[in-house]
Amino acid sequence: MATAEHYDFIALGAGEAAKLLAWDLSSKHGKKCAVIEHGPIAGACPTVACMPSKTLVHLASVIHQTRHDAPIFVHGAAAQGDIKADMAAVIAQKKAVVDGLAESFLGIFADTKVELIRGHGHLVGPKTVAVNGRLLTADTVVINTGSKAAVDASIPGMLDAKPMTHVELLELTTLPDHLIILGGGYVGLEFAQAFVRFGAKVTVVERNDRLLKAEDADVIAELTAVLSREGVQFLTSTTVTSVSGVSGDGVTLHLSGPGPATEIRGSHLLVATGRTPTTSGIGLVEAGIRLRPAGHVAVDEQLRTSVSGVFAVGDCAGSPYFTHIGWDDYRVLLASLTGSPREGGTTNRQVPSVLFTSPELAHVGLREHEAKAKGIPYRIAKLPMAEILRTRALGETTGFAKVLVEADGDKVLGFTALGPGVGELLPVVQLVMKLGLSYREIVDLIIVHPTMCEGLVDLFRSVPPRDM
């Protein structure tokens, strides 16, 4: 048996939180650190998720805008608007973005003197990891193995159809004739709009009665209308009973739902129905680390597992599946490891989100239907995007913003916006919410004209007065 090598810190997985922790502990606190990763060196976000998908979304937007504007501003053949994407060029641009990030991260590993071990590590004891024939021990072990797209193997023919997940779709160098997407959540909708803009026919199959089931009905209705106008077709309250064929060569989905269609045929199939934690096959149970029923590592508010000195962060720990939450997990754990634990740890933190369709959907705090379900009284203000003058200059006036404010106080409970670039509006609202300030603080701001943030003043000053 190999002689054990000891480290101060070992990360199993190179996700957002783990690599940041290793870099900080090594460069700023003099710790001996190693990060073990058999897949992308920077985790999923920069390589097979956030950054490459948003690159595709951007390129699709460029094509859409060109197609939309050409008949107005361009004469001749280009004005016909018959523009389709060169997917090989799109994927080449995506690869350039990913490769640039990977090179940058490799440089940080070298600069911070964190050892990057390329291999499949697994726990063989509470704080002992085996990898590439080596045996490593550490004072602190962090599990950051992420999650992966879930494919329902119980559907007959599904696995034989070799459906794509977002990983394979991001490598597709030919434009599908007809892309069928299972799932009307964030991943499904972003890709649906992108690929219909690239020039493909796109159908989204959603088992629930509406898309984005967590959102308010007015938001869903507006966004669905936008995507439908662009050509995305939707089948809601529809389940797949079986699949035949192979994605890329042609697939047929047999359906059960309210509509007359009992089957749908397409050239390619993307599964975007959720994610599952990557926690099997790495020795967690054998090391005494408790898992939750859904497979996540069980952690407390300071991200401690059931084994002393072992922590879990990010998707595999059941944190909300966002890179920015992985960043916050890093801050929580760094504070704990350096002797100043954050009060409450991960509890009561803001979970902002943005759906990167056009228009964008941004949200933080309580939604209207959530406030009603919890019996929380509120005042509401709503502002059409067309009243934010910046949207008129952009020619993108679809959507609205709304805010929930305490019924008997002035604190902001929640904020939602559907419009161009509205993700950039979130920090202003988040800061007011974090500090427990009155919404009137936003009303009193002087904001540059004409910007999107200028609309916040009009929205917040339209909050109804308290009932007397």
Image (cartoon, rainbow, N blue to C red):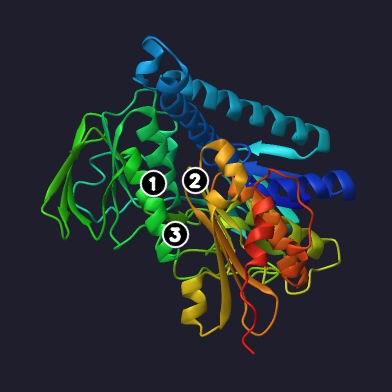
Q: Percent from the top left, x then y, of residue 20?
A: 74, 47
Say how many tags the image has: 3
Residue designated by label 3: 219
Instruction: Give the mark nearest the N terminus, 3 or 2.
Output: 3
Residue 128 placement: quadrant: bottom right
Say above or below: 104 vs 218: above
Residue 155 placement: quadrant: bottom left
The disc labelled 2 sits on which kind of residue?
Pro
Circle 2/circle 1 CB separation < 8 Å: yes
The disc labelled 3 sits on which kind of residue?
Val
The residue lying toward the viewer, choosing from 154 and 98, is: 98
Say above or below: 29 vs 79: below
Left or right for 58, reference 76: right
Per the image, label 1 sits on a secondary structure element best described as helix
Q: Residues within 10 Å of mark 2 (few under 14, many from 20)?
A: many
The disc labelled 1 sits on which kind of residue?
Val
Q: Percent from the top left, x then y, of residue 92?
A: 50, 21
Left or right for 5, reference 181: right
Residue at 44 percent of width and 59 percent of height: 219
Residue designated by label 1: 226
Quadrant containing the C terminus in the rendered view: bottom right
Disc on res. 453? none
